[in-house]
Image: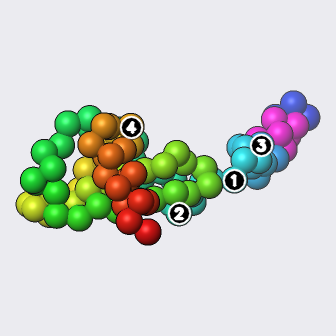
Amino acid sequence: MDVKLLALMALLAVATHVPAAHAKPISLVERCWCRSTLNTVPQRAIKELKFLHTPNCPFQVIAKLKNNREVCINPETKWLQQYLKNAINKC
């Protein structure tokens, strides 16, 4: 066998066993639920609101609609801010 061919085969064998990256994959738990938010959701269409706060994501508001669809609402919308303020004042 040629020495160059042997060296090339050894290099390829080593290259296939070296990890491509040292970064760890992000688990599904750490991913943000809301990738985009809606500013306009009719309040009468909302059946339930869920509030999520995870360490790596901003404050997230998920609305379950009466047709069982879930959408993310922008937490800065006026009516939602008023709803949260009223809920805090009740406590």
* Secondary structure at numbered mark 2: helix
- Element type at mark 3: helix
The residue depicted at 8 percent of the width and 60 percent of the height is: 67
Residue on which disc 1 sits: 24
The image's mark for residue 76 is: 4
| Dot 1 crowding, Cα within 10 Å, few <14, some 14–19, many 20+ | few
The residue beneath circle 3 is: 15
Of mark 3 and mark 4, the one earlier in the sequence is 3
Q: Would you say the magenta stretch is mainly helix, strand or loop?
A: helix
Mark sitting earlier along the chain (2/4): 2
The x and y percentages for residue 65 are: 15, 58
Mark 2 or 1: the one toward you: 2
Direction top: furthest residue = 4
Instruction: Please report contact status of discs 2 and 1: CB closer than 8 Å, yes or no.
Output: no
Q: Which mark is residue 29?
A: 2
Q: Is 7 drawn above or below residue 69 in the view shown?
A: above
Instruction: Estimate the spatial distance between the alpha carbons at disc 2 and disc 1, rounded to whole Å.
Output: 14 Å
Q: How far apart are the alpha carbons under marks 2 and 4?
A: 24 Å
Q: Are marks 1 and 3 in contact (CB under 8 Å)?
A: no
